[in-house]
Amino acid sequence: MTTRQENRILAAPVVLFLLAMLGFPTIIDIIYSLSEVSFENLRSPSFNGGQNFVTVFNDAEFWSASWFSLKFGVTTAFAECALGLILAVYLAPIIRNNNWMIAVLIMPMIIAPVMMGLMYRLVLHEFVGSLPHYLYTWFNWSPAFLSRENVFLTVFTIETLQWTPFAFLLFYMAYQAIPSDMREAAAVDGTRPWRMFWYIELPQMAPTIAVGFFIRFIDGFRVFDNIFVLTGSGAGGSTTSLSIYIYLSFFRSGDIGKALAASVVLFCVAFVILFFAGRFLRRKRA
Amino acid sequence: MGTIELKNVKKSFGTTDVIKDVSLIAEEGEFVVFVGPSGCGKSTLLRLISGLEETDDGTIHIDGEDVTKLDPYDRNLSMVFQSYALYPHMSVYENIAFALRTARVPKPEIDRKVREAAETLKLTSYLDRKPKDLSGGQRQRVAIGRAIVREPKGFLFDEPLSNLDAALRTQTRIEIAKLHKQLGSTMIYVTHDQIEAMTLADKIVVLKDGQVMQIGSPKELYARPNSTFVAQFIGSPKMNLLPNGSYDGQAMQFNKNVKITVGSVQGKPTVLGVRPEDITLCDPEASELRAKVAIYEFHGADNNVFVDVPGLGNLNIRADGKLDLKDGQSVGLKVDTSQIHYFDDSGARV
């Protein structure tokens, strides 16, 4: 048997697994997205051309959901990375001697996002929530956290509070990995702390920061569970992310063709972004 | 401009005293080498001077100004590290220019200085490369270039040649010596290699366990080591030490049968030191010291011979390379009595 054949045989199980678990759904996805289909005729969808895609692109809700996801992904990723970076650099000297602090700082990451949504639903509740209660007691005033105007800021804050520790952990590791003699050489050469950060430390951490931003963006862009539990689609669709839009079309409206057409669009966009991001990162490393 | 002075400097890490009361001075333009075995505190001493470590007690002065409490970036020194510590995201040019940009030197002047330094260090054709595309020797030259463009008050070298191979080490050593002549700046250089110390230094500081054992020019240390430690540390091969002797006014008596006639000596030495090149081999009958050749290594110009002296132990001798020796051969030893070093029981020079 040649090595080539051996390789094929050895790789076969995983290839079959991937074909079954990813390939099959993808093909069904594409077929359904091009068909007239509902829960009644799942087995015999009738081809209707690109009708579903036309519906999706003409749907104002699709565009507002996309805009929400994009805005949510970019702003949370940016805030998490900025806060994480500040924490990592600022706390590094303290944590170096108190390693247990890392465990405390990353605790929010341990909580399931659904639980996070539930928790805030309770905390922010207009009548029984602790936060409005104390705000009323102390200031005689409390904003409507989940109103159409404020809800984005609320979910943005919740997401940022939960996932900043992730960015912090990643950046702290990168910060620690900078060789100390490089800092020392720069210090002896007259480099003050601020310039040291911008010109020596930050460039060393740049690849990690890019990866961290990217991971957080993807995670924010596809957000579903914590927002869905907290506000559902939100007042007037104000918190309908793309994932929630697809979910609602599929399960609430039973509009399977439209939901899958939207998911195919999402897949294509994600693929293009991933492709260019990967190329960008590779070039940065080289 | 450029005197560096340490007054009663002390440093401890936890309960370990790493530097115990060190005082010394590096005069303007002097090349001072700190030498000593691993763990003697020589690198720590350099880090104290640079400000990378805080001094526990005592003061450090640069040009008379007390800099003990100053941060490293305010001391106006430059340091070259064993690991080079180049900035990997910058080109060679940017690496060398970085400190000048920090100091907000005008652009044309930066360019002139960087090219000048590159010329001196033969780096001109590598200016656009990143450090990872350079060899070890080139990287070390970039590190040196980075240090010299700033025209600092003093240069600190922390074992800069340890990561280079033997041939490159010799070559770079000569380049550093040339650079010192050319720049005329104060340099402090840390090494555990006594050959580097001997060849480069105007002044050698021998350290042991955080204390200065002796300070002097290479010649002084070689000719008049003040302790058995310095005597054995400086010089290669090591000086032979013959312990447990007693001086009877004429000769050093070691054993019933072994004595070395030395003439008149002041004090009461118990340890006799003699360098390998100050012993010559002769006919066994013509000498009061007889020995057998245990091992010899042929080095070309000379033979590195170990002989076994009954009742005394092994002695190392540097003999002519033209001599034809055999293992186990009986030889006589003739000691050049004018070159003998005497020490007492505590190891101090008599």
Image (cartoon, rainbow, N blue to C red):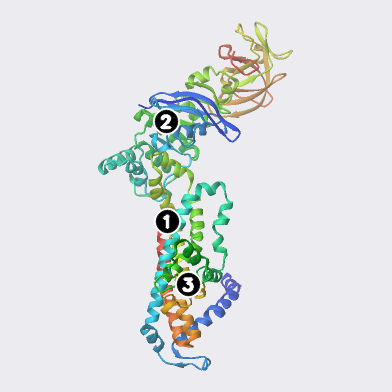
Amino acid tagged 2: Val
The residue positioned 47% from the left and 77% from the top of the image is: A243
Q: Is residue B62 above or below residue A178?
A: above
Determine if residue B202 is in view: no
Amino acid tagged 1: Ala
Check the picture and name the quadrant holding the C terminus of chain A. Answer: bottom left
Percent across and percent down for residue B324 are 60, 24
Amino acid tagged 3: Val
Q: CA distance from mark 3 to mark 2?
A: 56 Å
Determine if residue B120 is in view: yes
The residue positioned 34% from the left and 34% from the top of the image is: B151
Percent across and percent down for residue B74 are 39, 36
Q: Identify the residue position indicated by label 1 in the image.
A: A206
Mark 2 touching mark 1, by CB under 8 A? no
Q: CA distance from mark 2 to mark 1?
A: 35 Å
Few, some or many C-alpha atoms within 10 Å of disc 3 (few <14, some 14-19, many ≥20)? many
Q: How many marks?
A: 3
The residue positioned 39% from the left and 70% from the top of the image is: A71
Residue furthest right in the image: B256
**What is the chain letter for disc 3?**
A
Q: Is residue B249 above or below residue A155?
A: above
**Could you say whether the residue bearing mark 1 is in a helix, strand or loop?**
helix
Tell me the quarter of the picture where residue B37 sits: top right
Using the image, tell me which numbered label, if any, was put on residue B67: 2
**Could you say whether the residue bearing mark 2 is in a helix, strand or loop?**
loop
Q: Identify the residue position indicated by label 3 in the image.
A: A223
Mark 1 on the same chain as mark 3? yes
